[in-house]
Image: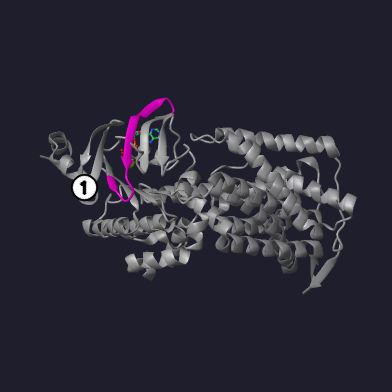
Amino acid sequence: MDVGILVQALVNGIMIGGIYAMVGMSLNMIFGVMKITNFCQGEIVMVSMYITYLLYTYLGLDPFLAIPLVALIMFAFGAMLQSLLINRSIKEDGDQNVLFLTCCLGIFLTNTALLLFSSNYRTVESIFSNQVMKVFGMNISLPRFVSFLLLCLATVLIFLMLKHTKLGKQIRATSQNPTGAQVTGIKTKFIYTCTYGIGAAIAGIAGACLMSFYYVYPSVGNVYGTRSFIVVTMGGLGNVWGAFSGGFVLGILETVGSTIVGAAFKDTLVFVVFILILVIKENLNIKRKRG
Amino acid sequence: MGNAFFKASGLNVKYGDIQVLWDVSFEAEKGEIIALVGSNGAGKSTSVKTVAGLIRHTSGTILFDEKEIPGGNARAAIDAGIILVPEGRQLFPQMTVYENLEMGACSKTAESRKKETLEKVFDWFPKLKERKNQMAGTLSGGEQQMVAFSRGMMGLPRMLIMDEPSLGLAPNIVDDIFRIARQVAEETGLTILLVEQDVRKALRLANRGYVLENGVVNITGTAEELSNNEEVKKAYLGF
Ligand SMILES: Nc1ncnc2c1ncn2[C@@H]1O[C@H](COP(=O)(O)OP(=O)(O)O)[C@@H](O)[C@H]1O
Ligand SMILES: [Mg+2]
């Protein structure tokens, strides 16, 4: 096989991996702080894609320029979901409630989108759309490349926020020890609301970027929901850096894999590798515990 | 007769259907150091968590400096000046010592006086100054307790509650913390409520104490009275 094609696939993988990393990170942030598994993260991405679509259709906003606005709207949307619904369903003993609630929310959002937008594919145009950059004989899709850069920038900003701002410190404190947070006067309920909002905003940034080279339809969330779970499981639940690298591994696996086994089998390949990773990881864990 | 500076009266607390506190009352004057003692599971932590607003009581009142403290609102208790140094320390393990201390300065006043308080804390515990950039989770138990106590002091408490500060620690470290606590109480009129399983340790610091058994306050008196009480001697002092 031509090495050039593999390198091209690798580069594409890294770029799509950035999206997976971002969605995985948003899921992990919510898990890390609130200890709940959010089963509607994919659908939150879908909502943000439709918002980007609406902003483009009615205001003519380029998806990349729309990012701050989409992030803001998604923050409000996430914070509202959390404070109106999720917070009220959290019980001390186990999280089955939240599990069912977020699953149902996902179904609800998908069907609402179906009702409002029908099942047709919707696309938007960015100034970068359909443009290709030639680097070392490789074809690099400009919208994907710009998305990748923006996602990297967003990630750095999120880390700086967590590290240095008062809210960021309070979020870290709450995630590390909720009791400790309470006795130092942190309003943990408020922190949970903010965290869910930030998680939705991060997913929203990924969604807006996606719209510059991909289309939206009501069940598109499935694609990103399952992938974000793979990413998070590979990288370790609650481990933000792990999710980040997991995203790239998954992206590369998909694109390189599909050039080797053919695009039709790429999902099969991804899931086989995912299952293998789970089995190997579990065995290592068992050995470590026994050893 | 006027009310005491701090007065918890008739506290009843349930976990689900199970009642664990029955009409528990205790009080303290300004600057006083009182102890809440009793064996494991007696309800000491539940009592102080209730006072600190981590748990809601089903009936009873908590009065602090003439104001009623609402149940189940940790932030309201803190804003009133009641700060809990919880059992098991409950630090933020992946944050530095400095960040842990910083988190303690939560109210507006505490935040505006963060620098001064921090200087005092580093004066009391020079070791914490040396380790201020180290992750709290990597400290020894004694150092962690110093951080927990100091994090509490960063909030400028008017009443400091310490839940089992001596648990699993070497006596000299506990003595250090107690010495500083007493000094602050004498200098600034800080009221201290100390929770201990070990009656002997508690009475080293406290002027007065309450003995809690199965969720009920049974015996109360000055440190001297308690150490001479036949029941206390038999049950807790090992005579
Ligand atoms: N979160 C909880 N849920 C249910 N029961 C609890 C909980 N915390 C403590 N208890 C029970 O309440 C009683 C008092 O506990 P606690 O206040 O922790 O006692 P102490 O601090 O004196 O050891 C014990 O019987 C304990 O088992
Ligand atoms: Mg206790």
* Disc 1 packing (10 Å; few <14; some 14–19; many ≥20): many
Q: Residue at x 41, y 57 (%)?
A: B151
Q: Work out whether residue B203 or residue B146 is closer to the camera in this orientation and state it.
A: B203
Q: Amino acid at mark 1?
A: Leu
Q: Total number of numbered labels?
A: 1
Residue located farthest toward the top when viewing the structure as drawn? B17
Residue A96 % position (x, y)? 55, 33
Residue B77 % position (x, y)? 46, 45
Relative height, residue A60 to residue B21 (above, below): below
What range of the chain is rendered magenta? B16-34
Q: Secondary structure at mark 1?
A: helix
> Based on the displayed image, in which of its 4 quarters is residue B38 positioned?
top left
Q: Which residue is mark 1?
A: B203
Question: Is B22 inside the magenta-drawn segment?
Answer: yes
For ligand 2, the image quadrant comes to top left
Q: Residue at x 36, y 56 (%)?
A: B149
